[in-house]
Amino acid sequence: MSGTEREPIGVIGTGYVGLVTAAGFAELGNEVFCIDIDAEKIEGLKAGRIPIWEPGLEALVARHRGRLHFSTDLADALEHARLLFVAVGTPPTYSGDADLSAVHAVVDATPPSDRHALVMKSTVPVGTGDAIKREFAEQGKGGFRYVSCPEFLKEGSAVADFLEPDRVVIGDDGDWAGDAVVELYAPLEAPLVRTDVRSAEMVKLASNAFLATKISFINEIANVCEETGADVVEVARGMGLDDRIGPKFLQAGIGFGGSCFPKDVAALKQLAGNSGYHFQLLNSVIEVNELQKRRVIAKLQKHLGSLIDKEIALLGLAFKPNTDDMREASSLVLSARLQAAGARVRAYDPVAEEEARKLLRGVSFCGSALEAVEGADAVVLVTEWPEFGELDFAAVAGAMRGSLVVDGRNFLDPAAVRAAGLTYEGVGRAAERNGGD
Ligand SMILES: NC(=O)c1ccc[n+]([C@@H]2O[C@H](COP(=O)([O-])OP(=O)(O)OC[C@H]3O[C@@H](n4cnc5c(N)ncnc54)[C@H](O)[C@@H]3O)[C@@H](O)[C@H]2O)c1
């Protein structure tokens, strides 16, 4: 590679991580060969259709159309690129272990080579890199190099996260492949943690487990606030100003979901268990998160009594705002629990309806928040989409049959909700504060 020429790369798997990584490197000037086994997705991408809803991604892909090549044939990437970034899914298995079948399918599909390296972006258990290197050796592909390069992007701000990362973590064996990945990321001028493969793998799992722990911690504080009359929003503000704590991930609510936290926490817990260590703290993090979603049902029952034949409106379905990702969304548990308790569920999400329809049974989907609250006995805010902050609560009150608003993300202005004659229930909020009763 000359100083100005950027290295062509391959990206295997064109989901949230793969497509953002591909478009991000294209923005840096790299030619990118994107491979996916999903032929329909590849055809769509060739025609300029972006399969996911991610702010800024469509424009970035369109801008770099000339540098982005899409194919279902791994040979297209092998021909042009030395570095093959792997961004295939690693969903949880029933036991909580990561399902690495897609990763192994990629390993098996690679031919013997002294010129190529796999760069693992998928989140994998510690020891996966070593296992893959052993597989390479057993399959007569000992020349294939391996680099761990975990991804930290957040859905909803993935493009910005790629281009301005807090850090880049590269775990390698100190050979040409690690050097090449360092060079690829150099233009981003991000703090670099270059380390061994196992430590890089652990950085990813430990980071997600820590963030999940912070969420479950503040949720438990919120639950104690409910018992003691303190207000968790005030408490979190007071805590977050401490430099050692920081304000992020201190928003109490109805629990975390999404494609990463639940599975990565479970995977780390399993990994520890498989190696003989009982990770007690993570067991509690998971349990608190499960119970937190169910506390909404208790709040509804406190005000409405039996939920049989009650109309409940869910506002927001995606696991967080600015994404259409429904994986492990709290809305899945909530709608199932509500229906099991005899309630009828109406729902509105500005973006995720198409995905939600594949996963939610027996739910009436509505075209707007106001349509969803029509005739509802209670409204539950599940996802803090910005548009819900602009809701006209007088209109909401006029449309509802009942008057209960459960704010599952402490996102609404309690005073505005109460001013419309509605009853406000947040998570860990003190009743007499916030424009109060
Ligand atoms: N989504 C996130 O926010 C995020 C953030 C950081 C890390 N990660 C990790 O990155 C990995 C990918 O996550 P994602 O959300 O992008 O998944 P995804 O499900 O959106 O995309 C995975 C893609 O891989 C393709 N694929 C599967 N097997 C393949 C194969 N053998 N060859 C080629 N393509 C194949 C699928 O068709 C799909 O398009 C996971 O390990 C995840 O834990 C995800």
Image (cartoon, rainbow, N blue to C red):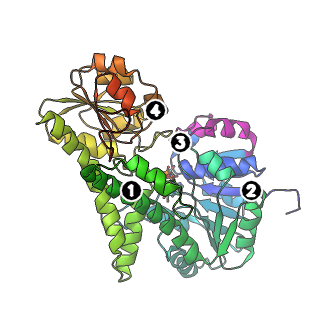
Q: Position of residue 348 (x, y in %)?
A: 36, 29
Q: Is mark 3 within 8 Å of ligand 1?
A: yes
* Front residue of 235 and 153: 235
The residue located at (27%, 46%) in the rendering is: 333
x, y (%) of residue 50? 57, 37
In contact (CB < 8 Å): disc 1 and disc 2:
no
Residue 129: horizontal and vertical position, in percent?
Answer: 55, 74
Snapshot quadrant of residue 378: top left
Determine crowd level at label 1: few under 14, some 14-19, many 20+ residues with C-alpha closer than 10 A.
many
Q: Amino acid at mark 3?
A: Lys
State the CA–CA distance, disc 2 to disc 4: 31 Å
Q: Which residue is mark 4?
A: 351
Mark 4: secondary structure: loop
Give the amino acid at mark 2: Leu
- The local secondary structure at tag 1 comes to helix
Q: Which residues are magenta?
A: 44-67
- Going 67% across and 40% down the picture, which residue do you hit? 61
Name the residue that disc number 2 marks. 188
Name the element at disc 2: helix
